[in-house]
Amino acid sequence: MTLGTLGQLALNIVLPSLPAIGVELQTAPGAERLVLSVFLIGFAGGQLLVGPLSDRFGRRVILLPGLALYAVLGGAAAMTASLEWLLAARLIQGLGAAAGFVIARAIARDVFEGPALVRIFGLLTLTMGIVPGVAPVLGGLIQDSAGWEVNMLITAAAGTLIFALCFFILPETGTRSDVEFAPSGVVISYISILKDPTFMRFSGTNALALGSLYAFHAGGPELMIAQQGISASAYGIVALLHSSAYMGGAAMITRFGPRLTDTRRAMAWAVSGMLASAIAMLALGLSGNAQVVPITALMVAFGFGLGATLPLGVAGALSPFKARAGAATAMLGAMQMSAGAAASAVVAFFDSTPEIAFPIVMIGMTGLAVFNAKRP
């Protein structure tokens, strides 16, 4: 389970450190937020590569180099003295993180089936909710006591530990294919998935909803830490609160999902709640009242809606596919991370007004998500 959470660790442990990175590396205002964007770009692109490669050549032969990249580039990020080298290290670390994310799910499909597979995917989903809540708390405490470089080293240490465990303990679970690996065939397969209207309805809504969260991740630390003066560790508590709400929304869908007769309508209602929260945050920003407590309360409501949206979106997006579920999963993940990269990059351009920038991006993305969920 920890194998699939390395990407979430690297994304979230650095959030409380973003303002300090900007100060210490003397970046242009807002440029430090690209630390999120470039990681997400690597994470997205890596998923599209790792899935087909692991099906062709086996799990371990792709996983171990990916974990090595993740660990080595985490260490390199900790030692860099410029934003340009930090961004390069994070981009490649994102590629390595994709190996753990995709192959963890591939291994589960290799080893388990029936009720056991459902249970394993449930546990994977739970850990994917826990890590984004715990990592910013840990990152904030480390930032206040030791600095952002140590947070980068934590990712390197985690990658090294998981690499060692996989190298010595994890057997090969996949079957090496004798079919020639053809990049053109992979591209054609992905294009055919994108042409499926059901996949695009659910995956598009999912990607826009999750991507909007990264708009807050890009602007929230600047607003709360740099401008309003809360500590990095206090910001970690903010992240924990909305991550806990996310898990609450996911738990609600897990419990009541079998009773839903119209999954698309339920998803549209959940995203509409997220949109309402984003509109309220913009109103606070425009009126000069974007303070920590009300923004946090609205992010809790936003997180609950996101937690309800994502399971519905994943189930709906993958429903048309059986034999190509792995490729569809990789495309879904790449779309989510790409949306997050775009959202955080846009917010990065608005250096002095994060309280207006991130709600506008969130409104745009969740508004499109509502439209996409409701369209015929």
Image: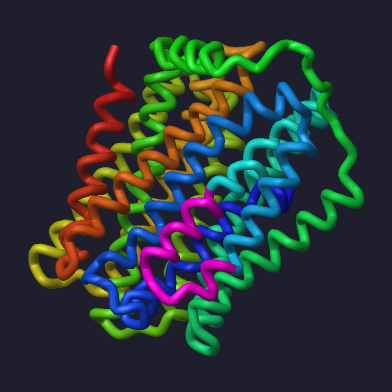
Horizontal arrangement in the rendering, residue 321 relative to residue 174 (left or right): left
Q: Is residue 364 left or right of residue 263?
A: left
Toward the viewer: 178 or 331?
Answer: 178
Above or below residue 299? Residue 154 is below
Number of dots carrying numbers: 0
Check the image and report above or below for 182 versus 155: above
In percent of width and height, residue 37 lies at 38, 52
Using the rendered view, name the quadrant where residue 269 is placed: top left
Specify start and end residues of the magenta stretch as a single range. 76-94
Taking the image as shown, residue 368 lies to the left or right of residue 254, namely left
Task: Choose top left, top right, bottom left or bottom right for residue 372.
Answer: top left
Where residue 103 appears, as percent x and y from the top left, is 70, 37
The question of residue 338 being in magenta is answered with: no
| Residue at horizontal 75 percent and vertical 26 percent from the top | 57
For the stretch drawn in magenta, the main secondary structure is helix
Task: Verify whether residue 82 appears in magenta.
Answer: yes
**Please, is residue 332 above or below residue 20 in the view?**
above
- Quarter of the picture containing the C terminus is top left
Q: Is residue 316 above or below residue 26?
A: above
* Residue at the image position 55 percent from the left and 22 percent from the top: 328
Closest to the observer, 80 or 135: 80
Scheme by which the image is coloured: rainbow
Which of the 4 quarters of the picture holds residue 224?
bottom left
Q: Is residue 328 left or right of residue 64?
A: left
Give the image location of residue 215, x and y in percent.
Answer: 31, 53
Residue drawn where x is 38% and y is 75% of the image: 21
Report the residue that reaches farthest toward the left. Answer: 287
Q: Position of residue 308 (x, y in %)?
A: 47, 40
Q: Nearer the viewer, residue 363 or 161?
A: 161
Residue that appears at 37% across and 68% down: 83
